[in-house]
Image (spheres, rainbow, N blue to C red):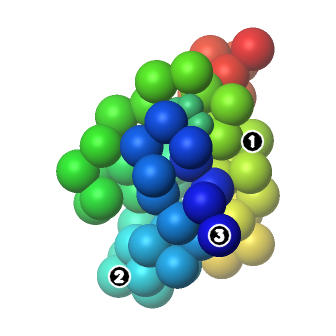
Amino acid sequence: MYVCICNAITDGQVANAIGSGCRSVADVFKRVGERPNCGKCVPDLCKMVRSSRGKCAPAMVDAAG
Ligand code: FES
């Protein structure tokens, strides 16, 4: 399932990124080699990162608007 439509990032890619040590949304984007575009996926990515006990930078949530 796509989590980020803009960059065609799937939940599997995000899970793999988190499993590889990513502990922030920025880390996840960096790991998959993409950058946020519209930002609508950021809240969902934050939930996934938080569920792995990572951090979710508030600035990225705000940027999602
Ligand atoms: S859906 Fe991820 S940046 Fe637009």
Crowd rating for badge 2 (residues with CA inside 10 Å; few <14, some 14–19, many 20+)? few
Q: Which residue is mark 3?
A: 1
Q: Residue at x 65, y 70 (%)?
A: 1
Label 3 residue near ligand 1, CB within 8 Å: no
Marks counted in the figure total 3
Measured in 3D between alpha carbons, the distance from the residue under mark 3 to the one under mark 1, in whole angstroms, is 16 Å
Q: Which residue is mark 1?
A: 43
Which of pointers 3 and 1 lies earlier in the amino acid sequence? 3
Give the amino acid at mark 2.
Answer: Ser
Give the amino acid at mark 1.
Answer: Pro
Q: Find residue 3 and name its label.
A: none
| CB contact under 8 Å: marks 3 and 2 | no
The answer to which image quadrant residue 62 occupies is: top right
Q: Is residue 7 above or below residue 58?
A: below
Q: Residue at x 69, y 31 (%)?
A: 40
Measured in 3D between alpha carbons, the distance from the residue under mark 3 to the one under mark 2, in whole angstroms, is 19 Å
Q: Which residue is mark 2?
A: 20
